[in-house]
Amino acid sequence: MDVDVAEQRLRSAGLRVTASRAAVLGVLAASADHPRVDQLIERVRARGVSMSKQAAYDVCEALRTAGLAQRIALPGAPARWEARTGDNHHHLVCRVCGETHDVDCATGRAPCLDPATAPPGFRLDEVEVTYWGVCSGCRATDHPPREDTTDER
């Protein structure tokens, strides 16, 4: 995503345009791998923008609140971030290496799944589905599942 597009998306979402917000949004839009915050920082710095870890978390949260980014919180792993929002897609995750892929909604319509039971009056507006397995690369090397104890938000 070029800088002008990132700036326009920030303005349209009601956010003040800053170099760090534009850079993070650009990195997220260009990333298919759902980067962790440490990876975001590295990629933003490679674009010539200085960023601390706290600033990265603050920017990601501002983008999430504005609907421009999504936080993917997987058990036992650091949070990952993506720019794909608003379409109620899901994720496929390798138990060994943590590789994460987008998966379109199983039924083709949001919110994708209707629960068998729900309290009366409960309106469902989002469903998170995570498909777990082992990617072909990890199956070929016969690695055991990872034990990620990284303390990340």
Image (cartoon, rainbow, N blue to C red):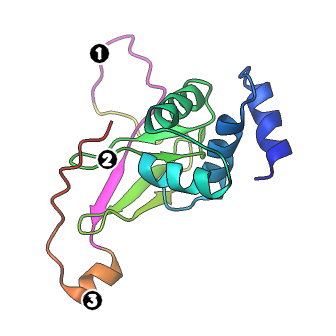
Q: Residues within 10 Å of mark 1 (few under 14, many from 20)?
A: few
Q: Position of residue 70 (x, y in %)?
A: 51, 38
Is residue 63 positioned above or below 104 on the image? Answer: above
Instruction: Specify whether 44 is left or right of 130.
Output: right
Dot 2 lies on which element? Answer: loop
Task: Write down the residue under mark 2.
Answer: 78
Name which of mark 3 and mark 1 comes first in the sequence.
1
Q: Which residue is found at the position 23% from the left and 49% from the top?
A: 150
Dot 1 lies on which element? Answer: loop
Under mark 2, the amino acid is Pro
Instruction: Tell me if I can see residue 36 in this picture.
Output: no
Tell me, yes or no, whether the two marked residues, 1 and 2, touch with CB atoms within 8 Å.
no
Residue 119, labelled with which disc?
1
Residue 83, labelled with which disc?
none
Instruction: Specify whether 24 is left or right of 79.
Output: right
Q: Position of residue 2 (x, y in %)?
A: 80, 52
Tell me, yes or no, whether the two marked residues, 3 and 1, touch with CB atoms within 8 Å.
no
Instruction: Tell me if I can see residue 12 in this picture.
Output: yes
Q: Which residue is found at the position 28% from the left and 60% from the top?
A: 132
Q: Which residues are magenta?
A: 117-134
Under mark 1, the amino acid is Pro
